[in-house]
Image (cartoon, grey):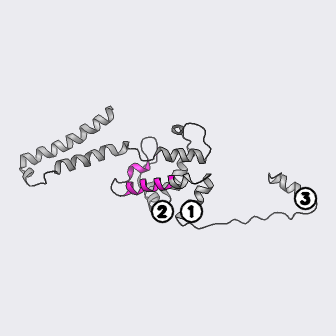
Amino acid sequence: MAIRASMLLAAFAKTGIEAAIDEVTGYQYERAPDASQTKLKLFLEEEMRPWEKTFTDELWIQFGRLTNWKRPIHSRPKYWGKLINELVYGYPDNDVMAWLKDNAPSPRSGQNYHQWLSGQFGLKRLVEHIWMLVGMATACRDMTELRQKMAERFPRELVRLTVYLLPVGPGRHAQIGRNLGLA
């Protein structure tokens, strides 16, 4: 609460200083009647953005279900960060993830990639993408199926690997199966 109160105080201070300058210079008669309110909203958005929740709990619940995570969702594993980079930042636009990697600091507790997106454009697209991902995830049985659906939704090149095995002869079938972990 103290952090949020200090953010409010900073936004009020910025707005108050600008309003006082307008009053002294006589500019308050020239500006729009709601200009101070608009500036306060912008200053509040600027102050509160780092603390705003962007990734819905529903996404973490779906990741938990698809990866068979049995622990509480708030203690999520680090590899889910790789899933976020792949499925959230890697799909809408390839340039977004590249820009974030080049311009934003390394993600760590308290400073994450999504906090560097603007509230007007990038953040809105990110939230829409997250909810689309949640919708797809609810229809999947595992992470492989989710990756496949994402690749179908956002065209990706399919890569197939060819594997050559020794020919199966009399008596060798069971041995090959054991070596591959099939028997």
Q: Is 80 displayed left or right of 99 in the figure?
A: right
Give coordinates of residue 138: x percent, y percent: 55, 51
Outermost residue to the top: 2
**Kind of residue sitting beneath label 1:** Ala
Checking the image for residue 39, the label placed there is none
Q: Is label 1 in contact with label 2 (beta carbons under 8 Å)?
A: no
Quarter holding residue 65 = top right
Closest to the observer, 98 or 27? 27
Q: Reading the chain from its start, which is encountered first: label 3 or label 2?
A: 2
Name the residue beneath numbered marker 3: 172
Q: Reading the chain from its start, which is encountered first: label 3 or label 1?
A: 1
| Residue shown at the point (80%, 53%) measured from the top left | 182
Name the residue beneath numbered marker 1: 151
| Residue shown at the point (15%, 46%) measured from the top left | 18
Highlighted range, magenta: 105-134
Marker count (numbered): 3
SS for dot 1? helix
Closest to the observer, 156 or 163? 156
SS for dot 2? helix
Q: Residues within 10 Å of mark 1 (few under 14, many from 20)?
A: some
Q: Residues within 10 Å of mark 2 (few under 14, many from 20)?
A: few
* Magenta-colored stretch includes residue 164: no
Q: Is 14 displayed left or right of 48 in the figure?
A: left
**Kind of residue sitting beneath label 3:** Arg
Seen in the picture, residue 110 relative to 114 is either above or below; the reply is above
**Kind of residue sitting beneath label 2:** Asn
Name the residue beneath numbered marker 2: 94
Give coordinates of residue 115: x percent, y percent: 39, 48
